[in-house]
Amino acid sequence: MDASIKSNVPPLTRVVSESLMSKLDEKSLKLIREKNFAFLATIDSSGSPQVTPIWIDSDGDHVLLNTAIGRVKQKNTKRNPRIAVAVLDMSNPYRYAAIKGRVAEQIVGQTAEEHIDKLAKKYLGKDKYPFRQAGEKRVILKIVPEHVTPPE
Protein backbone atom coordinates (compact mmCIF):
# COMPACT_ATOMS: atom_id res chain seq x y z
CA MET A 1 0.00 0.00 0.00
CA ASP A 2 1.21 3.49 -0.87
CA ALA A 3 2.53 5.18 2.28
CA SER A 4 0.69 8.38 1.29
CA ILE A 5 -2.67 6.60 1.46
CA LYS A 6 -4.13 6.72 4.93
CA SER A 7 -6.61 4.13 6.05
CA ASN A 8 -8.74 3.74 9.14
CA VAL A 9 -9.06 0.03 8.40
CA PRO A 10 -6.92 -2.10 10.74
CA PRO A 11 -4.09 -3.94 8.93
CA LEU A 12 -5.53 -7.41 9.64
CA THR A 13 -8.86 -6.37 8.09
CA ARG A 14 -7.06 -5.08 4.97
CA VAL A 15 -5.22 -8.39 4.55
CA VAL A 16 -8.44 -10.37 4.91
CA SER A 17 -10.30 -8.12 2.44
CA GLU A 18 -7.55 -8.57 -0.17
CA SER A 19 -8.23 -12.30 -0.12
CA LEU A 20 -11.94 -11.63 -0.70
CA MET A 21 -11.51 -10.19 -4.20
CA SER A 22 -14.75 -10.63 -6.10
CA LYS A 23 -14.64 -11.98 -9.62
CA LEU A 24 -16.08 -9.92 -12.44
CA ASP A 25 -18.89 -12.06 -13.89
CA GLU A 26 -19.51 -12.41 -17.64
CA LYS A 27 -22.59 -10.14 -17.67
CA SER A 28 -20.67 -7.33 -15.94
CA LEU A 29 -17.64 -7.84 -18.19
CA LYS A 30 -19.90 -7.67 -21.25
CA LEU A 31 -21.23 -4.26 -20.13
CA ILE A 32 -17.67 -3.05 -19.45
CA ARG A 33 -16.39 -4.24 -22.84
CA GLU A 34 -19.23 -2.62 -24.77
CA LYS A 35 -19.48 1.12 -25.43
CA ASN A 36 -21.20 1.85 -22.11
CA PHE A 37 -20.50 4.70 -19.74
CA ALA A 38 -19.75 4.29 -16.07
CA PHE A 39 -20.11 6.50 -13.03
CA LEU A 40 -17.24 6.47 -10.56
CA ALA A 41 -17.85 7.40 -6.93
CA THR A 42 -14.88 8.42 -4.79
CA ILE A 43 -14.53 10.11 -1.40
CA ASP A 44 -13.26 13.69 -1.41
CA SER A 45 -11.02 15.34 1.20
CA SER A 46 -14.04 16.41 3.30
CA GLY A 47 -15.39 12.85 3.36
CA SER A 48 -18.20 13.61 0.91
CA PRO A 49 -18.93 11.43 -2.12
CA GLN A 50 -17.83 12.70 -5.53
CA VAL A 51 -19.28 11.15 -8.70
CA THR A 52 -17.85 11.38 -12.22
CA PRO A 53 -19.01 9.89 -15.54
CA ILE A 54 -16.09 7.99 -17.07
CA TRP A 55 -15.05 5.58 -19.81
CA ILE A 56 -14.38 2.06 -18.53
CA ASP A 57 -12.28 -0.99 -19.42
CA SER A 58 -11.16 -4.28 -17.87
CA ASP A 59 -8.28 -6.72 -18.11
CA GLY A 60 -10.69 -9.52 -17.12
CA ASP A 61 -9.85 -9.39 -13.40
CA HIS A 62 -9.66 -5.67 -12.66
CA VAL A 63 -11.65 -2.60 -13.65
CA LEU A 64 -9.46 -0.09 -15.50
CA LEU A 65 -10.23 3.63 -15.60
CA ASN A 66 -8.10 6.32 -17.20
CA THR A 67 -7.73 9.90 -16.02
CA ALA A 68 -5.06 12.57 -15.81
CA ILE A 69 -2.72 13.08 -12.88
CA GLY A 70 -4.05 15.88 -10.71
CA ARG A 71 -7.73 15.40 -11.56
CA VAL A 72 -10.13 15.11 -8.63
CA LYS A 73 -10.76 11.37 -9.06
CA GLN A 74 -7.03 10.62 -9.18
CA LYS A 75 -6.30 12.69 -6.07
CA ASN A 76 -9.29 11.24 -4.22
CA THR A 77 -8.27 7.63 -4.94
CA LYS A 78 -4.67 8.31 -3.96
CA ARG A 79 -5.85 9.59 -0.59
CA ASN A 80 -8.60 6.97 -0.15
CA PRO A 81 -8.61 4.02 -2.57
CA ARG A 82 -12.20 2.91 -1.88
CA ILE A 83 -14.52 3.39 -4.85
CA ALA A 84 -17.84 2.35 -6.33
CA VAL A 85 -18.59 2.12 -10.05
CA ALA A 86 -21.92 1.74 -11.84
CA VAL A 87 -21.75 0.66 -15.50
CA LEU A 88 -24.95 1.51 -17.37
CA ASP A 89 -26.31 -0.46 -20.30
CA MET A 90 -26.71 2.40 -22.80
CA SER A 91 -29.60 0.54 -24.50
CA ASN A 92 -31.43 0.29 -21.14
CA PRO A 93 -30.03 2.59 -18.40
CA TYR A 94 -32.13 0.79 -15.78
CA ARG A 95 -29.86 -2.22 -16.37
CA TYR A 96 -26.42 -1.82 -14.80
CA ALA A 97 -23.57 -3.53 -12.99
CA ALA A 98 -22.44 -2.15 -9.64
CA ILE A 99 -18.88 -2.72 -8.47
CA LYS A 100 -17.36 -1.79 -5.12
CA GLY A 101 -13.64 -2.08 -4.63
CA ARG A 102 -10.39 -0.21 -4.23
CA VAL A 103 -7.75 1.28 -6.44
CA ALA A 104 -4.83 -1.11 -5.96
CA GLU A 105 -2.45 0.62 -8.36
CA GLN A 106 -2.08 3.85 -10.31
CA ILE A 107 -0.24 3.08 -13.55
CA VAL A 108 1.50 5.98 -15.33
CA GLY A 109 3.74 6.32 -18.37
CA GLN A 110 3.42 4.90 -21.86
CA THR A 111 0.96 2.19 -20.76
CA ALA A 112 -1.50 4.84 -19.57
CA GLU A 113 -0.99 6.95 -22.70
CA GLU A 114 -1.71 3.95 -24.95
CA HIS A 115 -4.71 2.98 -22.82
CA ILE A 116 -6.45 6.35 -23.33
CA ASP A 117 -5.97 5.89 -27.10
CA LYS A 118 -7.59 2.44 -26.82
CA LEU A 119 -10.55 4.01 -25.01
CA ALA A 120 -10.78 6.80 -27.62
CA LYS A 121 -11.08 4.10 -30.30
CA LYS A 122 -13.83 2.35 -28.33
CA TYR A 123 -15.86 5.44 -27.43
CA LEU A 124 -15.10 7.92 -30.23
CA GLY A 125 -13.88 5.77 -33.11
CA LYS A 126 -10.60 7.75 -33.10
CA ASP A 127 -7.12 6.18 -33.13
CA LYS A 128 -5.74 8.87 -30.81
CA TYR A 129 -7.36 10.56 -27.82
CA PRO A 130 -8.21 14.01 -29.25
CA PHE A 131 -8.56 15.95 -25.98
CA ARG A 132 -4.97 15.74 -24.67
CA GLN A 133 -3.81 18.90 -22.95
CA ALA A 134 -0.21 20.14 -23.13
CA GLY A 135 1.81 18.62 -20.29
CA GLU A 136 -0.99 16.25 -19.28
CA LYS A 137 0.10 12.87 -17.93
CA ARG A 138 -2.39 10.01 -18.03
CA VAL A 139 -2.88 7.45 -15.27
CA ILE A 140 -4.76 4.15 -15.16
CA LEU A 141 -6.70 3.48 -11.97
CA LYS A 142 -6.48 -0.31 -11.56
CA ILE A 143 -9.39 -1.41 -9.39
CA VAL A 144 -9.65 -4.65 -7.44
CA PRO A 145 -13.35 -5.55 -7.31
CA GLU A 146 -14.46 -6.56 -3.80
CA HIS A 147 -18.20 -6.81 -4.41
CA VAL A 148 -19.92 -7.12 -7.80
CA THR A 149 -23.66 -6.86 -8.38
CA PRO A 150 -24.20 -8.07 -11.94
CA PRO A 151 -26.90 -6.69 -14.23
CA GLU A 152 -30.20 -8.55 -14.30
Image (cartoon, rainbow, N blue to C red):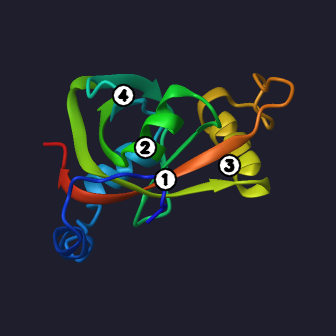
Pointer 1 and pointer 2: residues touching (CB < 8 Å)? yes
If you read the primary sequence from the N terminus, does the residue marked by circle 1 or circle 4 appear first? Answer: 1
If you read the primary sequence from the N terminus, does the residue marked by circle 2 or circle 3 appear first? Answer: 2
Label placed on residue 44? 4
**Mark 1 Cα shell of 10 Å, populated few (<14), some (14-19), many (≥20):** few
**Mark 2 Cα shell of 10 Å, populated few (<14), some (14-19), many (≥20):** some
If you read the primary sequence from the N terminus, does the residue marked by circle 3 or circle 1 appear first? Answer: 1
Measured as percent of width and height from the top left, residue 50 is found at 34, 23
Give the CA distance from mark 3 to mark 1.
25 Å
**Mark 3 Cα shell of 10 Å, populated few (<14), some (14-19), many (≥20):** many
Residue wearing tag 1: 4
| Total count of labels | 4
Q: Residue drawn 25% across and 69% down?
A: 21
Q: Residue drawn 48% across and 41% down?
A: 56
Give the CA distance from mark 2 to mark 4.
9 Å
| Residue in front for this viewpoint, 97 or 85 | 85
What amino acid type should be assigned to the residue bearing mark 3? His
- Looking at the picture, does residue 104 appear above or below residue 95? below
What amino acid type should be assigned to the residue bearing mark 1? Ser
Label placed on residue 115? 3
Q: Residue drawn 30% across and 58% down?
A: 145
- What secondary structure is marked by label 3? helix
Q: What is the quadrant of residue 135 in the picture?
A: top right
* 116 on left or right of 150: right
* 87 on left or right of 53: left
- What secondary structure is marked by label 2? helix
Residue wearing tag 2: 79
- What secondary structure is marked by label 1? loop
